[in-house]
Amino acid sequence: MDFETPETSQLDRYELAILEVLSRDGRLPITELAARVGLSKTPCAVRFKRLCDLGYIKGFRAVLDPQLLNREHVAFTEVKLSDTRESALGAFNDAVSAIPEVEQCHMIAGSFDYLLKVRTADIRSYRRVLGETISALPFVASTSTHVAMQSVKDVEF
C-alpha cells in the first residue's frame, strides 16, 4: 500500500514504513516493528507515538471471525430519508450509530441517502433488524436490500 500523499508529506520514510507494516500486522511489538523498518527500538517508539499523536494511527482492534461468531449474513441496505436537512441527518446518524448489527454507514450522493452494511446470523435475523430497528430510525422513508452471497475481498483499513 502506498501511503505517500500530500497529506503524508510531513512524514519521513521511516514513519511511512511504520504505517505500511502496521497496516498488515498491528500486533507487532515495538522491537519487531523497529527491526522491520530499519530503526532501533527508541527512535521507532518515538515515531510510533508521533503517528498516534498526529492521528495517523487511530487505534487498534481485533478482527473477529464472523463465521465462528454466527454473524455470517451480510446485507447492504439502501436508506432513503424523508428529510435531509442537517438536523434530520444528525438524528439519523446518532441513531444508526447505536445499532450493533450495522457495521458501516455511509452517506451517499445518488438516488438514496445512506448505505448500511448490516451483519447478522441469517436472513431471519436481518429481517428483524430491518423491520424493527432500521425502518424505525428517524426520518427513514424507505429501504432496499442487497444480500451478499460471498465476500471476495474484505480489507480492513
Image (cartoon, rainbow, N blue to C red):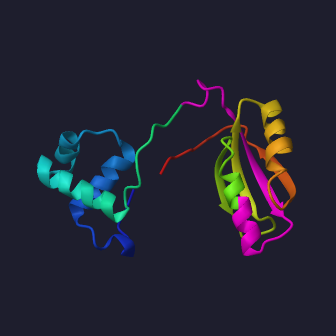
Residue 45 in the image: state x and y as whole percent.
Answer: 19, 51
When the figure is inspected, residue 117 is found, relative to residue 73, above or below; the finding is below
Q: Which residues are magenta?
A: 65-92
For residue 90, what is the image quadrant? bottom right
When the figure is inspected, residue 110 is found, relative to residue 45, above or below; the finding is below
Q: Residue at x 58, y 24 (%)?
A: 68
Q: Residue at x 74, y 60 (%)?
A: 92
Residue 55 in the image: state x and y as whole percent.
Answer: 38, 62
Residue 72 in the image: state x and y as whole percent.
Answer: 67, 31
Q: Residue at x 66, y 41 (%)?
A: 100
Examine the structure image and report whether residue 88 is included in the region drawn in magenta: yes
Looking at the image, the residue that sits furthest to the top is: 68
Q: Quadrant of the N terminus?
A: bottom left
For residue 80, what is the image quadrant? bottom right
When the figure is inspected, residue 108 is found, relative to residue 154, above or below; the finding is below
Position of residue 119 in the picture relative to residue 137 (left or right): left
Position of residue 123 in the picture relative to residue 23 (left or right): right
Q: Residue at x 83, y 31 (%)?
A: 124
For residue 57, what is the image quadrant? bottom left
Position of residue 57 in the picture relative to residue 29 (left or right): right
In front: 11, or 61? 61
**Count of numbered circles in the view:** 0
Examine the structure image and report whether residue 59 is included in the region drawn in magenta: no
